[in-house]
Image (cartoon, rainbow, N blue to C red):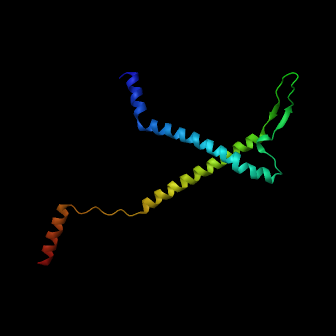
Amino acid sequence: MGIISEFREFISKGNVIDLAVGVVIGGAFGDITKSLVDKVVMPPIGLLLSGVDFSDMKLVLKVANPATKTAEVAIQYGAFANTVIQFLIIAFVIFMLVKLANAVRRKDAETPVAPPPPTPDQVLLSEIRDLLKAR
């Protein structure tokens, strides 16, 4: 079996396609979460902190100098705080999804399964038993 045919078989399996779909949806979910944190969560927090914008928070180690064209060197702890909040939101949403999935599985496991109907042999044997009891 050649490498091309092995690769074609590998790609055509469902797991690879499921993984690709998961990566694409995960990327989109990351964008949604970033927008949620930057546009919805952080403004009220900044308002509570007297209008401070977290994304602008930084500790400047070296000021930019336009004359020598050197860039500013800074520790951007505000951007880090935004990233931590994004992570916490994503982790919480995933936790809730897993919790929901587990609850559905438990509910399905608790639902009693109806016994299968008796086979024709069992029905016949039951009739014979009943006839013998009646004698």
Q: Position of residue 110 (x, y in %)?
A: 43, 62
Q: Position of residue 116 (x, y in %)?
A: 28, 61
Which residue lies at the image location 86% right of the left edge and 25% below the top edge?
Answer: 66
Q: Relative to 27, is 104 on the left or the right?
A: left
Question: What quarter of the picture does the N terminus occupy?
Answer: top left
Q: Relative to 78, is 103 on the left or the right?
A: left
Q: Is residue 127 above or below residue 31?
A: below
The residue positioned farthest toward the bottom in the image shown: 135
Quarter-of-image position of residue 135 = bottom left
Q: Nearer the viewer, residue 33 or 106?
A: 33
Q: Nearer the viewer, residue 95 or 69?
A: 69
Q: Relative to 50, is 28 on the left or the right?
A: left
Q: Nearer the viewer, residue 35 or 76?
A: 35
Which residue lies at the image location 59% right of the left edge and 44% below the top edge?
Answer: 29
Q: Position of residue 130 (x, y in %)?
A: 16, 73
Quarter-of-image position of residue 133 = bottom left
Which residue lies at the image location 18% right of the left edge and 61% below the top edge?
Answer: 120
Which residue lies at the image location 82% right of the left edge and 51% below the top edge?
Answer: 49
The residue positioned farthest toward the left in the image shown: 135
